[in-house]
Image (cartoon, rainbow, N blue to C red):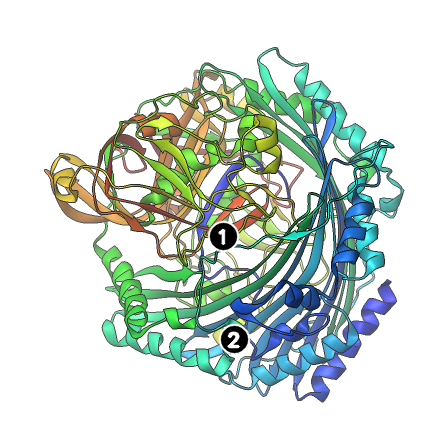
C-alpha cells in the first residue's frame, strides 16, 4: 500500500531495519567511469569526471527541461555506495552492499513541480527524463539558463578516512569485540546482534540560475541489540551510534559504550512497570528526547504544510508560543552530526534556523518553492532521499538551547510523573497537531525522586499545547547520538535532535487504569 | 530491456558469479515504472514519472553469505561488481545454514494466473490520470465550506521481475496497481484536522470511483471537528476495518522464524495453544485473485500456499523462511505474510455499534509501538465516543496500552465487512475492557 499516510510524518530510531547497503573492499567503482578521486579533496573537475559529464552536457539537459516554458530547472547527480555487515549468533556471517547511481531532473512552474529521473548517465536518457519533467509547463516562451558558477561550500563533516578505503576485514573485528563485551558483561544475555553500516554519497548539483555545487556525504553507524533472560522472562533492547563520521569515530571508548549501553538498556527492563494512565508531568532526559521537538513543532514548521495552510502552526509566526526561556532551532551546521548538510539538496546554503526564539515563533523551514511563495530567503531546508525524489522542506538537527534550571530541581519538582529517557519512534498529524512518541525506557518520578524503571509506553500530546506547557528547561544540553531517520511523504532522510532536561507540566501517558 | 533480456541478464549474472568462485547464487533483475500525481486547486501540484531497474544477487560461497544490489546494469561494471562481491564474501564466517532452498520447495506450477497484471497499463493516458485526481479534489471540496485545503491524488505502477537460482529455480512476475485518493483539511478553531481516503486496484477499470474517494476523504476530515480527549478508563473498543492492520503487526513480527530463533518472540512455544479469543481465525492466502500481496513464490523462491495461521484463537503455525527454518530445524513454508483474510462475522459496523452501550470507536492509530519479545504495546488513537449505539463525540489525543497476550483474548466480535484496499482484508473488530488513557 502506498500514499495513504502522507501527512502523518514519522521518525524511527535507525537500527537493524536499514534498507539495502553493505560491504566490499572497493565496491564504489561500480560507477560509470570509475573513480578518479575519493573523499573530501575532490574538485569540480573530479565530480564531472566521476559522473562522466561536462558542463556543456548539463547545460543542454537544463535547456531541454526548460523547453516547455518552465521557470526553473535543476539536475541532481548522485552516486551512493552502502555497506552493511552483520553479526548474529556470535559470528560475522552476513554482509550486504548497495550501489545506486542516477540523476534527478526537476522543472518548476510557479508552485508546480515536474519531476523525473534517469539511472543511465547518457545524453539520450537524461534528455528524455528532462522532457518528461518539462511537461509541467506548457507555454512557448523559454528562459535561457545562466552559465554555471561553482559555489564553494563549508565542510561540516571532515573525516579522516573515506569509507571506500576501509575494507570489510578491517570492520569485522569491531563487531566481534562488541559481541564479546556484551556477553562478558552480564550472564543473562542470550542473544546479541551487531551491525556495522557505512554509506558514502557523491552529489553534483546544477540549476538554471547558474548555481553549481558538489558534496561528499559520509555516514557511519554501529547498532547493537541484545536479548536477555531472567527467571523465564525475556527482554530485548538496543543502542546505536551514528553520524557523518569515518571509522576513526569508533574509538575503544565508543566500542565500550555501545556494548555497555545495549546491555544496561536491556537488563533494566526486567524491573520495569507501567505508570498510571492519564495526564502526567513528563520530564524529558537530555539527548534524544529532542524527539519531542521534532514531532511537536518541527514538522508543523515545514513551510510546505503552511503554504497549503494545513499546519496547526499556519498562523503562528510572530506570536508567543512558549515561555521566554524556550529557544528551538533547526541546524544544518553541527560538525559530524547525522542531520548536518554542507548544502541542501537544491544547492542552497544550509544554516542554523531559529524556529522559536525566547518563546516567540520566528521562522518556518523553507525550501525553494515555499521561500518564493512567502517572499523570504530559503533556510536551506530543501532535502530529498535520493535522486529518485523531489526535494521538500525537511528538518536537519532539531534542538532546544539551554535554559535557566537545573536537572535536579526539575526532578524534585515532580510529585508523580515520568522521566522519559529512550525512544523508538514518533509521529504527528500536522493539522490536528497531535503528536506521539514511544518511550522505550525511563523511570517513574515519585515525590521528587526517580524510582522504578518504566517501559513500552506511548506519549500523546498536542504541539501548541505542549510548547505552552514547557515549564522548566535545564542547562545540560545534549545532542542525540543515535541514527534517527525521518519519514515524510515516503522519503527518509537522516536527522538528529537534542534537548536539555525539560519538564512539561502535563501530557497524556499510556498506562494502566486502576 | 525486455523480459527476455532481463532473464538472460539474471542467468548470466548467476553463471558469472559461479565462475568467480560462488558455490550457489540467486539473482533477481527487476524493472518498475510509476507515475504519481497530486492536484490542488485544480492545478497539478506535482507530477513524477519514474523508471527504475536493478539487479540483486545473493552469493553463497562455501556457506558464507552476502547480498548485493546495484542499479548500474552496464555489463562491464557488473562484472567488476560481481567479482568484488564474491571476493568480499570470503572474509565472512561460514554458516552451515547458508544455502539455497531445497529444490523440492520450489513451485511446480508457475502458470496459475493470479490476476495481478493489467495489460492495459500503458494505454491509460496522462490526461485520464490527472482528471481522476482533479475530480476527487472537486468532489471533496464541494462537501463543506469548512474545508480549507483539498488535494486529489493518483498513482500507478508496473513492476516486472525475474528470479534465477543456480539450483534450478526460474520465476517471472509482472504486476500492476492503480491508486487514487484525496486528502482534506478543515478549519476547526485553532486546529486543522485532516482526513484522507485512498483506494486502489490491480486493474484500472476496477478502481474505486472519484465519487467514493472524494466523499470519504472529506467526511473523514469533517467528522473530526470538535475532537477532544476524554477521561482515562477501561472502555469497549470497536475498530474501523481499515485501522485494524496496525494491531495485526503485533502477530506478524513474533510469528517469524527469525524472531523465534533470536529469542525475541512472545509467541515462542505457543503452537497448539490459545493466543487469541476463539473468534479469531486468520488465514494467509497468497492466491486471492487481484490481491495486493498475491504471489506464486516468496523471496526465497519457495512455493506459496494458503495456510491457516490462527484457528479459532489457537496458533497453528509460524512463518518459516529458508535460512531461519534451517537454523531451527523446521521446514520452510514461506517467511513473509501474503494476503491476510479472516473468518468473518455476521454483522456490519452499524449493527455492531448499535449494541455498544459505552465504548470508543477507534478510526485511526497515531504512532505507538509494540514489543515483540514481551507483547507489551501502547498506541495513540483517535475516533469517537459511542453511547447507546450512537457516535456522540469525536475523540483524539488518547492512548491504548496493554499486552498482546491478554489483548487478543478480549476480541469479542468480527464484522462481515473486510476492507478491500489492502492486502490485509480486515473486518471491523470489537474488544472489551481496553485501557485508554486520556485526561
Where A323 sits versus A274, above or below? Answer: above
**Dot label at residue A38:** none
Instruction: Tell me residue B395's x, y (percent).
Output: 42, 23
**Dot label at residue A94:** 2
Instruction: Say whether residue A258 is visible.
Output: yes
User: Which quadrant of the figure has residue B219?
Assistant: top right
Q: Residue at horizontal 29%, vertical 33%?
A: A326
Label 2: few (<14), some (14–19) or many (≥20) C-alpha neighbours in 10 Å: many
Instruction: Tell me residue A167's x, y (percent).
Output: 51, 80
Q: Residue at horizontal 79%, vertical 32%?
A: B130
- Secondary element at tag 2: strand
Instruction: Decide if residue B187 is on the left or right side of residue A256.
Output: right
Instruction: Decide if residue B369 is on the left or right side of residue B353.
Output: left
Figure quadrant of the C terminus of chain B = top left
Circle 1 residue: A341
Label 1: few (<14), some (14–19) or many (≥20) C-alpha neighbours in 10 Å: many
Instruction: Tell me residue A127's x, y (percent).
Output: 82, 52
Where A265 sits versus A458, above or below? Answer: below
Q: Rounded to the nearest whole Å, what is the CA distance between mark 1 and mark 2?
A: 31 Å
Chain name for mark 2: A
Give the camera-side residue of B317 and B27.
B27
Figure quadrant of the N terminus of chain B = bottom right
User: Does label 1 or label 2 sit earlier along the sequence?
Assistant: 2
Q: Nearer the viewer's eye, disc 1 or disc 2?
A: 1
Q: Residue furthest top?
A: B145
Instruction: Tell me residue B408's x, y (percent).
Output: 43, 43
Q: Residue at horizontal 41%, vertical 61%?
A: A242
Give the camera-side residue of B310 and A125.
A125
Instruction: Say whether residue B116 is visible.
Output: no
Amino acid at each position: 500500500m502506498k500514499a495513504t499516510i502522507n501527512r502523518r510524518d514519522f521518525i524511527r530510531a535507525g537500527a537493524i531495519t536499514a534498507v539495502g547497503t553493505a560491504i566490499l573492499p572497493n565496491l564504489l567503482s561500480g560507477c560509470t567511469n570509475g573513480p578518479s578521486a575519493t573523499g573530501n579533496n575532490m574538485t569540480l573537475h573530479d565530480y564531472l569526471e566521476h559522473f562522466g559529464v561536462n558542463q556543456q552536457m548539463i547545460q543542454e539537459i537544463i535547456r531541454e527541461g526548460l523547453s516547455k516554458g518552465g521557470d526553473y530547472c535543476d539536475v541532481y547527480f548522485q552516486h551512493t555506495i552502502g555497506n552493511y555487515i552483520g553479526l548474529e549468533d556470535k559470528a560475522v556471517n552476513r554482509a550486504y552492499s548497495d550501489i545506486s547511481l542516477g540523476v534527478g531532473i526537476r522543472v518548476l512552474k510557479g508552485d508546480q513541480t515536474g519531476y523525473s529521473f534517469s539511472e543511465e548517465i547518457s545524453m539520450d536518457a537524461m534528455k528524455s527524463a528532462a522532457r518528461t519533467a518539462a511537461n509541467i509547463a506548457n507555454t512557448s516562451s523559454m528562459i535561457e539558463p545562466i552559465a554555471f558558477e561553482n559555489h564553494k561550500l563549508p565542510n561540516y563533516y571532515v573525516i579522516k578516512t573515506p569509507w571506500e578505503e576501509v575494507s570489510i576485514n578491517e570492520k569485522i573485528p569491531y563487531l566481534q569485540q562488541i559481541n564479546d563485551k556484551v556477553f562478558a558483561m552480564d550472564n543473562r544475555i542470550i542473544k546479541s546482534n551487531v551491525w556495522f553500516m557505512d554509506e558514502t554519497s557523491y552529489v553534483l548539483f546544477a540549476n538554471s540560475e547558474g548555481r553549481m555545487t558538489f558534496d561528499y556525504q559520509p555516514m557511519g553507524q554501529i547498532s547493537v541489540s541484545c536479548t536477555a533472560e531472567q527467571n523465564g522472562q525475556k527482554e530485548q533492547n538496543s543502542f546505536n551510534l551514528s553520524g557523518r563520521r569515518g571509522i576513526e569515530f569508533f574509538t575503544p571508548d565508543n566500542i565500550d559504550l555501545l556494548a555497555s549501553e545495549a546491555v544496561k538498556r536491556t537488563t533494566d527492563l526486567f524491573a520495569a512497570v507501567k505508570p498510571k494512565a492519564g495526564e502526567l508531568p513528563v520530564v524529558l532526559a537530555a539527548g534524544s528526547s529532542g524527539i519531542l521537538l521534532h514531532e511537536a513543532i518541527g514538522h508543523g514548521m515545514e513551510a510546505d504544510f503552511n503554504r497549503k495552510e494545513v499546519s496547526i502552526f499556519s498562523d503562528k509566526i510572530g506570536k508567543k508560543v512558549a515561555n521566554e526561556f524556550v529557544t528551538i532551532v533547526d541546524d544544518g551546521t553541527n560538525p559530524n552530526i547525522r542531520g548536518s548538510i554542507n548544502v541542501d539538496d537544491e544547492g542552497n546554503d544550509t544554516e542554523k534556523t531559529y524556529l522559536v526564539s525566547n518563546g516567540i515563533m520566528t521562522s518556518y523551514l523553507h525550501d525553494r518553492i515555499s521561500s518564493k511563495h512567502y517572499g523570504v530567503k530559503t533556510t536551506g531546508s530543501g532535502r530529498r532521499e535520493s535522486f529518485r525524489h523531489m526535494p521538500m522542506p525537511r528538518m536537519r538537527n532539531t534542538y532546544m538551547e539551554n535554559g535557566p534550571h537545573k536537572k535536579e530541581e526539575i526532578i524534585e519538582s515532580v510529585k508523580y510523573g515520568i522521566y522519559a529517557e529512550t525512544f523508538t519512534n514518533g509521529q504527528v498529524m500536522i493539522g490536528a497537531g497531535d503528536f506521539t512518541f514511544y518511550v522505550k525506557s525511563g523511570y517513574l518520578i515519585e515525590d521528587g525522586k526517580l524510582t522504578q524503571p518504566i517501559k513500552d509506553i506511548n506519549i500523546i500530546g498536542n504541539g501548541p499545547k505542549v510548547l505552552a506547557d514547557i515549564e522548566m528547561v535545564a542547562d545540560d544540553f545534549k545532542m542525540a547520538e543515535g541514527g534517527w531517520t525521518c519519514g515524510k511523504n515516503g522519503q527518509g532522510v537522516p536527522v538528529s535532535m537534542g534537548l536539555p532536561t525539560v519538564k512539561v507540566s502535563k501530557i497524556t501517558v499510556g498506562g494502566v487504569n486502576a | 530491456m525486455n523480459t527476455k533480456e532481463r532473464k538472460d541478464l539474471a542467468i548470466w549474472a548467476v553463471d558469472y558469479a559461479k565462475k568467480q568462485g560462488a558455490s550457489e547464487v540467486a539473482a533477481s533483475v527487476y524493472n518498475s515504472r510509476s507515475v504519481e500525481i497530486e492536484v490542488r486547486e485544480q492545478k497539478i501540484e506535482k507530477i513524477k514519472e519514474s523508471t527504475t531497474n536493478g539487479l540483486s544477487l545473493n552469493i553463497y560461497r562455501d556457506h558464507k553469505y552476502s547480498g548485493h544490489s546495484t542499479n548500474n546494469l552496464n555489463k562491464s561494471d557488473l562484472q567488476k561488481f560481481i567479482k568484488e562481491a564474491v571476493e568480499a564474501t570470503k572474509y565472512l564466517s561460514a554458516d552451515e545454514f547458508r544455502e539455497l532452498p531445497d529444490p523440492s520447495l520450489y513451485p511446480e506450477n508457475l502458470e496459475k494466473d493470479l490476476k495481478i497484471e493489467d495489460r492495459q497499463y500503458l494505454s491509460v493516458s496522462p490526461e485520464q490520470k490527472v482528471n481522476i485526481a482533479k475530480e476527487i479534489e472537486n468532489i471533496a471540496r464541494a462537501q463543506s465550506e469548512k474545508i480549507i485545503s483539498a488535494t486529489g491524488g493518483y498513482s500507478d505502477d508496473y513492476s516486472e521481475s525475474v528470479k534465477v537460482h543456480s539450483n534450478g529455480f526460474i520465476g517471472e512476475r509482472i504486476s500492476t496497481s492503480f491508486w487514487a485518493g484525496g486528502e482534506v483539511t478543515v478549519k476547526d478553531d485553532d486546529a486543522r484536522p485532516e482526513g484522507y481516503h485512498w483506494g486502489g486496484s490491480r486493474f484500472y477499470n476496477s478502481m474505486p470511483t472519484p465519487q467514493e474517494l472524494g466523499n470519504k476523504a472529506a467526511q473523514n476530515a469533517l467528522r473530526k471537528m470538535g475532537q477532544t480527549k476524554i477521561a482515562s478508563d477501561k472502555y469497549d473498543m470497536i475498530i474501523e476495518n481499515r485501522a485494524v492492520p496496525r494491531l495485526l503487526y503485533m502477530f506478524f513480527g513474533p510469528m517469524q522464524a527469525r524472531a523465534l530463533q533470536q529469542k525475541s518472540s512472545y509467541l515462542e512455544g505457543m503452537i497448539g495453544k490459545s493466543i487469541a479469543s476463539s473468534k479469531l481465525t486468520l488465514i494467509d492466502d497468497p492466491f486471492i485473485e487481484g490481491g495486493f500481496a498475491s504471489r506464486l513464490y516468496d523471496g526465497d523462491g519457495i512455493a506459496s500456499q494458503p495456510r491457516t495461521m490462527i484457528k479459532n484463537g489457537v496458533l497453528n503455525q509460524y512463518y518459516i523462511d529458508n535460512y531461519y527454518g534451517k537454523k531451527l530445524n523446521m521446514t520452510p513454508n514461506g517467511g513473509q505474510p501474503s494476503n491476510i483474510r479472516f473468518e468473518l462475522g455476521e454483522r456490519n459496523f452499524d449493527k455492531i455499534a448499535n449494541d455498544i452501550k459505552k465504548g470508543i470507536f477507534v478510526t485511526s492509530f497515531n504512532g505507538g509501538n509494540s514489543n515483540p519479545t514481551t507483547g507489551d504495546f501502547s498506541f495513540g488513537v483517535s475516533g469517537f465516543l459511542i453511547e447507546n449505539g450512537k457516535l456522540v463525540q469525536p475523540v483524539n489525543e488518547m492512548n491504548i496500552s496493554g499486552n498482546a497476550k491478554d489483548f487478543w483474548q478480549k476480541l469479542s466480535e468480527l464484522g462481515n465487512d473486510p476492507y478491500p484496499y489492502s492486502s490485509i482484508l480486515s473486518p471491523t473488530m470489537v474488544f472489551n475492557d481496553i485501557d485508554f488513557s486520556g485526561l
